[in-house]
Image: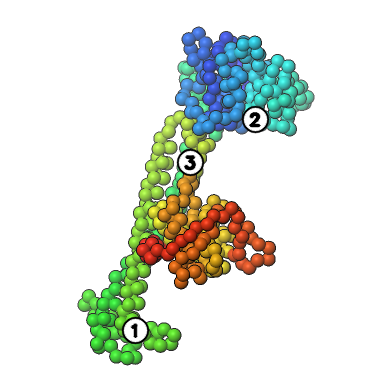
Amino acid sequence: MSLNWKEIDLILHELDLEGAQIQGVVQSAFDVMVLRLHKKGKTINLLISIGSGECRLHETFKPFPKSDKPLRFAQFINSRIVNGYIIKAKQISDNRIVEIIVKRGEFIYNLYLRLWSNAANFIVTDTEGGILDAMRRQPKRGEITGGFYSPDDYLEETQKTDKPKREYFLRDIPGEESFNKKIDNYYAEQGGSLSLETLKEQVKRIFEGSIDKISAALDRLREKAGLFDDAEKLKNYGDLILSNIAFIKPGDKFLETELDGRKISIDLRMEQEGIAIPPAKIAAMYYDQYRKAKNGQDALYREIAAGEKELKEVTEKLEKLLAEENPLVLAKLISRGNTAKPPVSILKKEKNRPGLTFIRGDWQIIVGRDASENDELLRRFVRGNDLWLHARDYHGSYVFIKQRAGKTVPLDILLDAGNLAIFYSKGRNNAKGDLFYTQVKYLRRAKDAPKGLVIPTQEKNLHVKLDEERLRALEKARI
């Protein structure tokens, strides 16, 4: 709720601003500002808010946070008004328009605070009414630099209505403090969108949604990891086949034996191009399945550990924000994105995403294996700042490195992606090749071109020799 005209009058009467020097300005958001005033040895922090439903001015007794970067209107006030003296401060009639006249040197400035919920603004003019700047620039109203402002124009508009005039009263707020102090406490506790209760509910909604998503992703990963718990039996199958190889006859479909005191049947019905595979090679295939299962299990456990760490960090951040008792600080954290939804772990593979995914440290590399997967990844699963790589002289996969906010792709990760681009191309047999790489936003589709075909711009070149050790490490990092 915004202040009514009687409350504004009382606040101005208590403050007695005439003769105060403006010594500083702090603007933490686009619609909230504090002027630091000094008068007779006392400092007054005058809060001005033009936010919808919370238009007001009053002394604030709570620490006021600075903006992370200088805001335009605060810079203007600092350059023109700071160090000036207030020679007049009053409300014009009963219309919630406060006029503050400031003298700095030989210059005089008119500050108009229009505290109307649906049309609030803070406008600075010269003595002739020429607008020097406005907190909220509104071209349709002419409230921009170079425009003209006179509160009389607005007062005439309000007087044209035939509606009976509404009666206003001072808010009945308990306490023995000044009205300024009671209003400051009221807005901090329950006053609209800047109240602690409202802000904390907003933080809860944002974070609890993210916590639920991360928890659900962890549940899916743990369920998937459980599928690998029987990986050891694949190795045992290979061992049992080799140890019983003398007893396996041509045409046998199963090996009947024992494992841990239990009778089991090991499937031997494997063929390659219609030809039965010999037992030794079947054992080797079981060993290969075991290695892949173990590698997948290790990658999943790394992914689960990263997800659990992320969940802990998000939960601790929520607890810290909920412990904040200054609504102005909490509002600032929200406005600058400190409570934006935390991303689910980069190790989490998007649902139904095509292609292969590799995790190297905190980086995610995606490989499209054919034109259809390349096209689907481009359309749905990569973003403009992600890095795209492709073998220059060979048909092959598109490889993408998912961008991390504020991070540059390390050379080691670039070489990982480069090796994958060559390995999954027609250039694999040459064991080396040249690559294009550029950001996804610099790709364009050729008109009437086959599916997935793109033309890179602003591309760079990279020459890669296949590194067997690196490829083995990447295979283990595949999820």
Image check: 290 left or right of 25?
left
Judging by the rendered image, the residue that carries numbered circle 1 is 268
Dot 2 amino acid type: Arg
Residue at mark 2:
136
Query: Amino acid type of disc 1?
Result: Leu
**Whole-Å distance between the Cαs marked 1 and 2?**
78 Å
Query: What numbered label is drawn on residue 27?
Result: none
Of mark 1 and mark 2, the one earlier in the sequence is 2
Cα separation between marks 2 and 3: 25 Å
Report the front residue among 80 and 49. Answer: 80
Quadrant of the image occupied by residue 170: top right
Q: Going 46% across and 61% down the picture, which residue do you hit?
A: 464
Q: Quadrant of the C terminus?
A: bottom left
Q: How many residues crowd around disc 1 within 10 Å: few (fewer than 14), some, or many (20 or more)? A: some
Kind of residue indicated by mark 3: Thr
Report the residue marked by disc 3: 339
Q: Residue at x 38, y 42 (%)?
A: 316
Position of 218 with respect to 99 (left or right) is: left
Q: Is residue 209 above or below residue 58?
A: below
